[in-house]
Image (cartoon, rainbow, N blue to C red):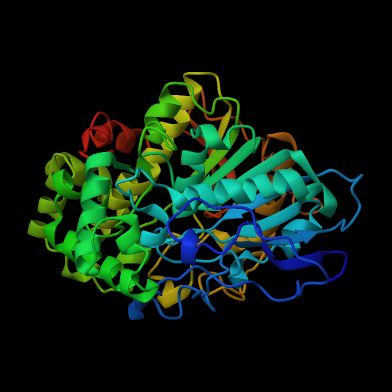
Amino acid sequence: MEGEVAAFMGVSYAAPPFGPRRLRPPVPPEPWTGVRDAFVPGPTAPQPGYLPAMAGLLEEAAAPGEDCLNLNVWTPAPGRTGRRLPVMVWIHGGAFRNGSGSLPSYDGTRLAAEGVVCVTLNYRLGAEGFLLLPDSTSNLGLLDQVAALEWARDNIAEFGGDPDNVTVFGQSAGAISITALMTMPRARGLFRRAITQSGAGHHSHPEHIARRVTERLAALAGAKPTRESLAEVPPERLIAADAALGQEIAQAAAPEQWGESAGGGTTVLPVVDGATLPQRPIDALAGGAGHDVDLLTGTTSEEFRLFLVPLGIGPRITDQVLQGFLAGLGLDPAEARKVYARSGAAPGDLLSAALSDHAYRIPAFRVAEARAAHGAQTFVYEFAWPSPALGGALGACHMAEIGFVFGTLDNPLAGPDAPRELSAHMRAAWTSFARTGRPTGTGTPGGGLPHWPAYAGGRSVMRLGGAGAPLVLEDPAAEERELWRGLREAVPGGA
């Protein structure tokens, strides 16, 4: 117990996915008797860790192990089944290769203190979670997430939660996963609301690219591209093969060959296999899928600076390199430079702004607009508070908002001087959305957010953490949105 919140750590929601169960869909855990230790988080999924350049910026998962399909629960009402509090289930990011639900930034204590039951979970990553195998096995990581949501449906009332009022929320790969879950038949009815932070519905692989990824990764691991052969490969060798594939993809930078992974930021992605994931999520949303799920979505202002600044890439971007990048994205370089000129004069700053839109902001807007066409309620935010890390060079980068959502401001991207009031506003908005479907709430006595209108109509966006108080902007990225119109959806592989 911490104050009025109880935590239950390392609860198994599925059996260990190794041995005869390796590279197979999740199954329920074996029942147990007696008392289990719920004070220590469970093992995490096998993963490579981050590049040395990210040391001190990103939290590393600890203690990988076979019994990795586990979750953590924070509740203000342990054992009080009559409370029926809203439930918030967090799906972590990490490019589908890193991460854990037990990272310090994801501690659910403060959210639970706001009157919700908070759940964080692990799922299979990398080759273990997202290959497309010849027997059509695919999306095991997404199926793990479904299994965790089924566990919540069946058990969360014992922790004071309402199984009929579940909100899934997540960031980056977690947000991409949630957008996919909104369109998956297996996930239907398991959650009522969704919050997607810096991830939307474009990132996925069609079957032909997913099979190419499987075949090349298997070759790099010294195995055949079959479940039987890959299941014999030690996890660390699969991880090394995945890293080698990432390097090859980065050097090739060929969308026609590697689809949404071109550039090397990812290797595996959710697979549009026609069964577990019938369509590319953005296309399914445009057709009306998930219209019964309330959605809060958004991005940070300067997403891509997290990937460019620590690696020292920005200063190496010349005008010639910038022009090539912009043209490769399908943009007219001269027109794009005019639009992005306000992001800074240096070519590296312009590239960061364009890539932030390409990967995050434009996909989020397209999700909101696809849903608006079907009358589905969607609220959009922009997180604009600049991280002080690396002397402020990161700006309002990817992941900068996470500590504010959880109230864990001692994380590397926030720091001791981060504004507590902004975190209070965001926790109030996120938990209000989980409770009612609207991101309202005062956050702190005597102050709070202004009225937050839905996106439809005025293309309304709530800016959080910029200079001054939070405020609503109407169509704040009109020029950028028009610049990208008709482009990104045409990228091979499901841009």
Which is nearer the eye, 374 or 481? 374
Q: Is 71 rendered above or below residue 393?
A: above
| Residue 216 x %, y % | 20, 59
| Residue 423 x %, y % | 66, 59
Q: Is 8 rendered above or below residue 322?
A: below
Residue, x 24% and y 48% (percent of image)? 211
Residue, x 34% and y 53% (percent of image)? 131
Q: How many marks?
A: 0
Is residue 340 rendered to the left or right of residue 41? left
| Residue 475 visible | no
Residue 165 lies in quadrant: top right
Q: State the residue lying farthest toward the left.
A: 320
Residue 74 lies in quadrant: bottom right
| Residue 441 x %, y % | 74, 43
| Residue 14 x %, y % | 61, 57
Which is nearer the eye, 55 or 391? 55
Is residue 149 rendered to the left or right of residue 465? right
| Residue 186 visible | yes
Which is nearer the eye, 245 or 456? 245
Q: Is 281 rendered above or below residue 413?
A: above
Residue, x 14% and y 50% (percent of image)? 254
Which is nearer the eye, 179 or 27? 27
Residue, x 41% and y 39% (percent of image)? 201
Is residue 331 rendered to the left or right of residue 398? left
Q: State the residue lying farthest toward the top.
A: 374
Is residue 457 rendered to the left or right of residue 361? right
For the C terminus, the image quarter is: top left
For the N terminus, the image quarter is: bottom right
Residue 82 lies in quadrant: top right
Q: Is 272 rendered above or below residue 317?
A: above
